[in-house]
Image (cartoon, helix red, strand yellow):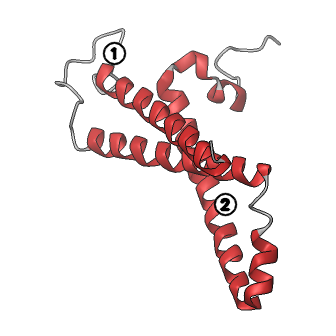
Amino acid sequence: MAQDEHKEGFKGMANPSRYGIERVAYWLMRLSGLGLLAYFIGHIYETSNILRGRVGWNEFLELTQTTEGHIVLAIVIAMCVFHTVNGIRVMLGHGGVGVGKPARPDYPYDPASQNYRHKIGIYSAIILAAIAMMYGLAVMFGE
């Protein structure tokens, strides 16, 4: 039995080359949300160590004062900036800003909501996240 191209499952759904930058933004939004949730939980655990006193706090804080800790924090900065900027883009799109005029759905259907304005918003979110991450790395590594 031959593999039908429409039955690829998760691999087909996650393929960013098939659907363009919109699919990449979709996955980055979900992954950054899960990453920020994991960071939030870890941050609550970290700040609860202040109950152990100054020595306990300083012992745990040494974990983040390493090269790996700085890289993780830079990734968190990038996730936060991307998630925020892309979320604003999505909210504006749901409000009708930059969506374009509705048209009759003739084949081949080209959705008006996936126009250049939203693609510029996606690229802007990625670029701003990269700039914020680089700035965070420069501050943490003191260069």
- Residue 6 lies, in percent from the top left, at 64, 19
Residue 31 visible in the snapshot:
no
119 vs 1, left or right, is left
Judging by the rendered image, the residue that carries numbered circle 2 is 38
Determine the residue positioned at 34% across, 15% down: 110
4 vs 72: above or below: above
> Mark 1 falls on what kind of element?
loop
Label 1, label 2: how many angstroms apart (C-alpha)?
A: 37 Å
Residue 116 appears in which quarter of the rendering? Answer: top left
The foreground one among 125 and 13 is 125
Which residue lies most toward the left here? 101
- Within 10 angstroms of label 2, few (less than 14), some, or many (20 or more) residues? few
Question: Residue 107's x, y, as percent?
Answer: 34, 9
- In this rendering, would 125 be left or right of 134? left
Q: Is the N terminus in the top left, top right, bottom left or bottom right quadrant?
A: top right
135 left or right, relative to 63? left
Q: Amino acid at mark 2?
A: Ala
Q: Mark on residue 110?
A: 1
Residue at horizontal 76%, vertical 77%?
Answer: 58
- The number of callouts visible is 2
The quadrant of the rendering that contains the C terminus is top right
- Name the element at disc 2: helix
Q: Amino acid at mark 1?
A: Asp
